[in-house]
Image: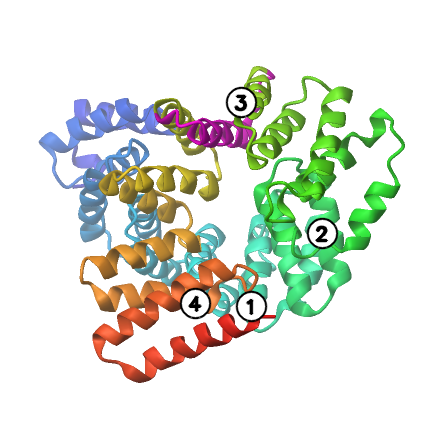
Amino acid sequence: MRDGALTPAARSALSKASDDLTAGRFADAAAGFRSVLAGNAAVPEALFGLGVASGQLGRFEEAQKALERYLSVRPASSEGHSALAAVLLSAGRLERAKAEFERGLRLDPGNVEDAKALARLYLADFNGARAVALLEPLVSSPDFDDDASLLLAAGYTGGASPRAALPLLSRLLERRPAPQPEVFVISAIAGSRAGDFAFSERACAEGLRASLNSDDIEQRCLRIVSAGFVKGLEAGLRGLPEDFESLIILGRLMTDVVESADSPVRERGLAFLKQAVEFRPSHPAALYNLGRCLRVLARPEAAIEALERALNAQPGGELHALILTQLALAEQQLGHDAKAEAAFLQSMDRNRALPRHLPSPAFEYYRFLDQAGRPTEAATIRDEILRWDAGFLPARIERARSLAGAGRLREAVVEAEVVARNGDPSNAQLLRQAHLLLLQTYTKLGRKDDASRHQAWLNQARAAKQP
């Protein structure tokens, strides 16, 4: 039914609901669109508006039904396919979301936002070539922003052209204020894969300084920064407040660079972090890194004291969620499971409110629930993490194990193969989990050749560990 065929009261209700939607009053908007549809069940504008508003409210089933009805009336609406794809994506229905984004792009090939959303899904599947095919034709569009450049660079890096990513990433690295942590992480990977290790180290050095609390940057840069970089930082210390950033960087790197809890390297790192806190006693990043180091050194009581001081320093954004996660882990070390869970829950709440969710701290909560023998709750958190980032491999191997345990062997193989093919070579534990699960699962499926391939990998890894 056309807007012109509505009664004056229905037109007024539709106009008000549209205004509410524009203003972000989603509950009022949804109620208004429902009132219009109660008397006129096929008003396209009301169906579209209800779908968008309900999606914003997390009522994904209602949103999906409204948008599917809208598309039955206006099947050539690229906007409708985009809106439905966004709802499906939020609901974790990734394959259907891909299909709707593809339909929307066929109708509106210049839609950069849809191309970016679809590229993210392909990158999560480690299909860099497909992400490049989506984004390359749009480079000259006025809507092609820094996020699109980063996604294109990630596509090049994950495909066969990592060197093509470097000019894009160089421009992003020069942005001021400093770009998001993901820029530094992808730059480090791209430089390494392109054989430009100077580029990787530069990205790591800049990233470590730009974000004093990014676990993503640190985990990547631990495997890239040279001993010379660390020695240079240490040699440059003058015992002055100007050393603050260098002290934190050194403390962070030394916390994670070795496995032995009583390592003298870690003790040196702890001393650097203590000195940073002396220079700035209320700096949340300094206190967070001090608390984290103390927890890794198995000193949970001291860690909790530092982390609580970090919370009192009013941290913002990601750092707040990271501090709460470290606090939960320290309480867990002390056997205070109720306190640990309370801190994990607070961390999850903070994490969910972030524009870019952090899978690593959420995965610590998954582990806590799994170790506590609460598999249903653990699976819910695991699946939420994978809705945030389908490329987060620790969660994917856990889903593979769950599928194998439920007898869904072919689905388990698909998940575990993704991890085995795309896991970081330096993460031997994750890769071993994937290859061992694949050996066991292929054996159960009677696929001897595939099982032998993974047995060979395990044999080779075992031989490489021997002196």
Residue 352 horizontal side relative to residue 75, left or right: right
Rate crowding at label 1 as few (under 14), some (14 to 19) or many (20 or more) other CA atoms within 10 Å.
few
Label 4 or label 2, whichever comes before in sequence order: 2
Q: Nearer the viewer, residue 414 or 66?
A: 414
Label 1 or label 4, whichever comes before in sequence order: 4
Q: Nearer the viewer, residue 417 or 289?
A: 289
**Local secondary structure at mark 4:** helix
> Per the image, is 329 magenta?
yes
Label 4 or label 3, whichever comes before in sequence order: 3
Residue 420 marker: 4
Label 3 or label 2, whichever comes before in sequence order: 2
Q: Tell me the residue that label 3 is attached to.
A: 301
Q: Compute the Cα span from label 3 to label 1.
A: 36 Å
**Local secondary structure at mark 3:** helix
Label 3 or label 1, whichever comes before in sequence order: 3
Q: Can you tell which quarter of the image residue 37 is in?
A: top left
Question: Disc 4 vs disc 3: which is toward the camera?
Answer: 3
Q: Tell me the residue that label 1 is attached to.
A: 465
Discs 4, 3 touching: Cβ within 8 Å: no
Magenta residues, start to end: 313-337
Q: Can you tell which quarter of the image residue 385 is in?
A: top left
Q: What's the magenta bit mostly, secondary-structure-wise?
A: helix
Residue 155 horizontal side relative to residue 335, left or right: right
Q: Quadrant of the image for the N terminus?
A: top left
Which residue occupies 32% across, 84% down? 449
Q: Compute the Cα span from label 4 to label 2.
A: 27 Å
